[in-house]
Amino acid sequence: MNAWHMDGAMAVAYLDGEMGPTLAASVEAHLLACDRCRDLLAPHVPVSRLDRVWAGVADAVDAPVPGPLERLLRAAGMRGHTARLLSAASSLRLQWIAASSLALLFAALASGETTRWGLLAYLAIAPILPVAGVALAFGPYGDPAHEIGLAAPYSMFRLMLMRAALVLGTSSVLAFVTGWAVLDGGRAGEWRMAAWLLPSLALTGVTLALSSRFDPRHSGIAVGAVWLAGVVVTNLHEPNPVLFGAASQAGYAVVAVASVALLVVRRKEFS
């Protein structure tokens, strides 16, 4: 690489952008290993330009601009490092929240149809959106800061629980707001706006418990598939609210509590 060196004319052409892309790439590769050519090039680079570039790099790396969720968590009194760890999850970004809102909106709008699948669309989708969000809230595939979290002196179990609670809370607020805005807000619609809540807690708890042994994505897919299969099977012939009746709601509460207990027992598996 050092058999040839730049001259003054080549340095000026490179800096002015007048060099062809092939030769410019060769020059850049050469500069990585040649002190002599870097010293030749340096006097031609404006110091103010270097300062602006370095300041931009420092701002992006050392002081990244906090996102909306991170700013909200900090405003609520959460410490900066915790807020950043929580807001790094893919399922807590605006794109995911917007997609979840649209899915809930379409499902709620479908509940106004006269077919037997109208209301079931909303009741079936609302509980599994938190499952999908939790499955993407931690782990090597859903958390861009996963390796940093593993290396940091921070409890992964605590981080997982905090992210899961934040995802579940966000999804629940979206579901309640969507249900209130689109469904009948009167007495006839009250049960429909809350019938998904305990199933959501139970499905999320099972997903977290399974994630102590399996990949969170696979756990979420399996739990969601079983739930949707149950909705389809119980409503093949005629509308049947058995999955949202009193007995089923009690069962969901038991499953949610059992899942939390299992999580506590297996908390070391998340480290």
Image (tube, helix red, strand yellow):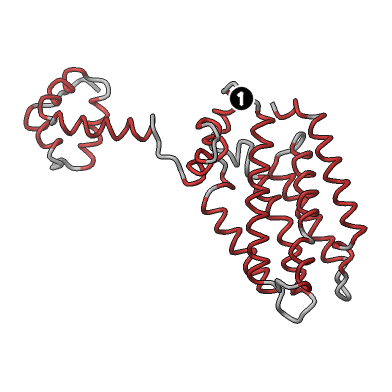
**Residue farthest toward the left in the current orientation of the protein:** 9
For the residue pair 146 and 261, the one nearer the viewer reads as 261
The quadrant holding residue 265 is top right
Point out the image quarter for the N terminus: top left
Instruction: Determine the residue positioned at 20% across, 17% down.
Output: 35
**Residue 269 image offset from top left, x and y in percent:** 75, 28
The quadrant holding residue 156 is top right
The quadrant holding residue 115 is bottom right
Instruction: Determine the residue positioned at 47% across, 47% down.
Output: 68
Q: Which residue is mark 1?
A: 154
Instruction: Determine the residue positioned at 53% across, 31% down.
Output: 79
Q: Residues within 10 Å of mark 1 (few under 14, many from 20)?
A: some
For the residue pair 58 and 260, the one nearer the viewer reads as 260
**Residue farthest toward the bottom in the current orientation of the protein:** 114
**Residue farthest toward the top in the current orientation of the protein:** 35
**Residue 256 image offset from top left, x and y in percent:** 82, 45
**Residue 154 image offset from top left, x and y in percent:** 61, 24
Per the image, label 1 sits on a secondary structure element best described as loop
Kind of residue at disc 1: Tyr
